[in-house]
Image (cartoon, coloured by chain):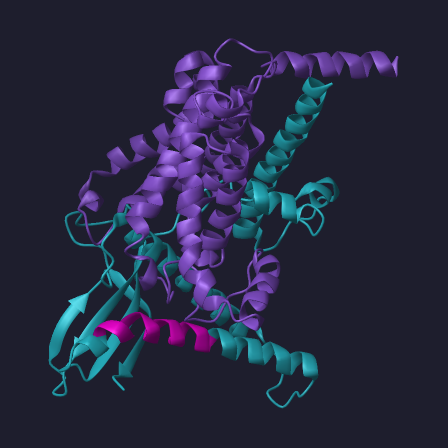
Amino acid sequence: MLFKKVDFLYNKLEGLFKIDGSEKLFLIFFRLTISTIALIEIASLIKDLPLLFSSAETLIPQELIYLKSGYFKYFHPLYQFIETNGISNIFFPTVTRIYIGALIFLLLGFFTRYAAGIALVFQLIIFRSFTPFNYGYDFFLTMSLFYCLVFPVGYFFSIDKKLFNPVLNLGFNYRRVIQIHLAMAYCFSGIAKGLDSGWWNGNSVWKALASADNNYHTFPSEIFIIIGIGTICKSLSRSKFMESRGKNYICSP
Amino acid sequence: MKKTLLVLFFTGHLLLIFFQSTWTTIDGYWGFHYNKKPSIFIFNFLKQNQYTEPYYLLTGINTGYGFYGIHAATEKYLRATYYDSLDQVLKKDRYFNFSSTNGISRLEGYASFLANYVAKTKNAIDADSLSIANNDPDVLSLRNEYKFKKDYVVKTLKWLGKKEALKRSECASYKIELLTIVPENIWERKERQAKPNIYVIQEGRFPVQ
């Protein structure tokens, strides 16, 4: 009886991740876009990195006290090792270069899995050593690089394919993992907003938009209400929206 | 076999995300409305703890999924003012030489972090009802922590303006302000064209050495 129930549940799960024919295109698209976005992001920030408490081109605040964060206990032994071995002068100026190199390798699909792993670790070192400079984008980039590591993104349209010609029997819908992940993110974002009266009466939208740099605060209150309720509805219905858009979803995650 | 492993691994992975999303939403709501952390056994077991933490950090799923939801905050930012020896203003600056919107956004995020840090430290100090003469090691350690946190903010503000101040030979001192837009109830505002009020959370004035 129990075995039957487990089997039934497993079959349901297998059905959820059933292939739909778009896996190959998705894996190519995912690798190219994630590595390109990450490269554009680091390129846009590279000139500003020394302004973020860093004496080298990283977000690592060598010039300021390290603040304890969830990452501190994992990075602290690494920084101690670097300090005691006197390799700070080599390590800090090169981390960004290694990160960019790994992203280029990932983009080209050259030793893809290793490149994704290195990019993931260095993204954590560069961007998470000092969490106060983080925003949601950094978390989503970590997630994306992790998915580049575990998904077989280097099997198609890559240098690896040309050199090693690996064979992959695609029997799993990797796109579905991303769909469910993002659907949950948007849905819970909508629930959180729905629980706050400010999103229903427009006050939270005013707070989110009011800035010293714009005049959005001058909008009529009714506009804020429409935007607030619209945001809740859009976030909550995002999961259904993703489902109905099918293949087109991958173009606008 | 490989497919089974993939199904099980990604099901577990997505379940963790589901628990993290549920937890951060409940935690945000409870923390804001009841000012305490909820404790639910099953969530405590699966949420970010010493056993699950490495996986959460490596995969990046430790983000707050109720982002910008419960109790949205107003914009926080930093402003520098540089003075000469006669106290005349040489320059006012909000962007600290950042050239990219990415860098400016991160600086604004940091200003929000600093504002929360200052508020939390102040609340902790206000809630400390123990006698000043109390020399218990735990109490002393707690007070050292308050001092560290207060010093940290001052040190940060000082660092932010230091490079620019040193570049200007005529600059004798500089002031760094941590500012916030004061939240308004849009249904009670009389003049919607008026600029929002600004409040100085903390400021520091530093001589150029």
Q: In what quadrant of the picture does the N terminus of chain A appear? A: top right
Q: Is residue A203 visible?
A: no
**What's the magenta bit mostly, secondary-structure-wise?**
helix
Query: In this view of the protein, which residue sits in the foreground, A46 or B17?
Result: A46
What residue lies at 44% left-to-right and 49% top-to-bottom?
Answer: A98
Most distant residue in the top direction: A21
Most distant residue in the front direction: A163
What residue lies at 33% left-to-right and 76% top-to-bottom?
Answer: B158
Q: Is residue A112 left or right of residue B113?
A: right
Query: In this view of the protein, which residue sits in the foreground, B129 or B96?
Result: B96
Shade of chain B as shown in the rendered figure: cyan
Query: Looking at the picture, does residue A133 appear above or below residue B179?
Result: above
Query: Looking at the picture, does residue B23 appear above or below residue A58?
Result: above
Residue A219 falls inside the magenta stretch = no
The answer to which quarter of the image holds residue B12 is top right
Q: Is residue B27 visible?
A: yes
* Magenta stretch in the rendered image: B150-164
Query: In this view of the protein, which residue sits in the foreground, B30 or A154?
Result: A154
What residue lies at 47% left-to-right and 31% top-to-bottom?
Answer: A186
The answer to which quarter of the image holds residue A113 is top right
What residue lies at 14% left-to-right and 71% top-to-bottom?
Answer: B91
Q: Is residue B47 left or right of residue A211?
A: right
Shade of chain A as shown in the rendered figure: purple
Query: Looking at the picture, does residue A23 appear above or below residue A210?
Result: above
- Spot occupied by residue A245 in the image (x, y as percentages of width and height): 41, 13
Residue B154 falls inside the magenta stretch = yes
Q: In what quadrant of the picture does the C terminus of chain A appear? A: top left
Query: In this view of the protein, which residue sits in the foreground, B204 or A151?
Result: A151
- Spot occupied by residue A105 in the image (x, y as percentages of width and height): 43, 37
